[in-house]
Amino acid sequence: MTDWIVSNRDSHSLFLYFFGHISNAVVLSVRGVYLVLLALGRAGVTVFAAAAVAWRVAGLRLALTAAVSFLVCGLLGMRVPTMQTLALMVVAVLASADGAAHPRSVCAARTAASWKP
C-alpha cells in the first residue's frame, strides 16, 4: 500500500483532485491565521489572544500564565516559530471541532425534530 501511494501521489486522480485540494485549503488556512497573528504584533497576541481569552475562559491565573509564556517566547527570540505553531494549532482545533461537531449536531437536530409530536 505504501509503495502504491508513493508511486502514484503525483499522477492518480484521487491525490490530484481530492487530497490536493484538502492540502491546499489547510495550507492557505494556516498561512492566513499566521499572517493575522503577525499583523496583531507582540502586544496584540500576548494581550488579546493569550491573556484576554484565557482570562475569559478560565480565570486570572491561566491568563497570567499565558501572558508570561508568550513574553518568555518573545524574550527568547522564538516569536516566529511560536506564531507558526499557534496558527497550526488554531486551524487544527477549528477543523477537528467542525468535523466532529457538525455531523453530530445535524443528526441530533434531525432526531430531536422527529421526536416532537
Image (cartoon, helix red, strand yellow):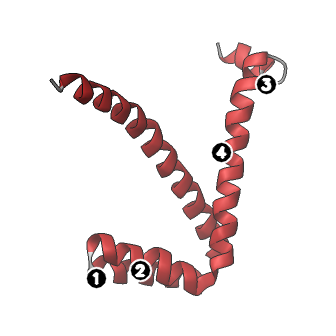
Q: Marks 3 and 4: CB-CB under 8 Å?
A: no
Q: Position of residue 63 (x, y in %)?
A: 35, 79
Q: Which residue is mark 3?
A: 16
Q: CA distance from mark 1 to mark 2?
A: 8 Å
Q: Which residue is mark 2?
A: 51
Question: How many C-alpha atoms fall within 10 Å of the one at disc 3: few (<14), some, or many (≥20)?
Answer: few
Determine whether 114 is above or below 102 in the image: above
Q: CA distance from mark 4 to mark 1?
A: 33 Å
Amino acid tagged 3: Leu
Q: Position of residue 100 (x, y in %)?
A: 40, 37
Locate residue 113 relative to residue 66 in the image: left or right.
left
| Residue at (18, 24) in percent of width and height | 115
Q: Marks 2 and 4: CB-CB under 8 Å?
A: no
Q: Which residue is mark 1?
A: 60
Question: How many C-alpha atoms fall within 10 Å of the one at disc 1: few (<14), some, or many (≥20)?
Answer: some
Q: CA distance from mark 2 to mark 4?
A: 27 Å
Q: Position of residue 10 (x, y in %)?
A: 83, 24
Amino acid tagged 2: Ala
Amino acid tagged 4: Val
- Say which of 109 and 84 sits in front: 109
Q: CA distance from mark 1 to mark 3?
A: 48 Å
Number of disc labels: 4
Tell me the SS state at disc 4. Answer: helix
Q: Earlier in the sequence, mark 4 or mark 1?
A: 4
Q: Earlier in the sequence, mark 1 or mark 2?
A: 2
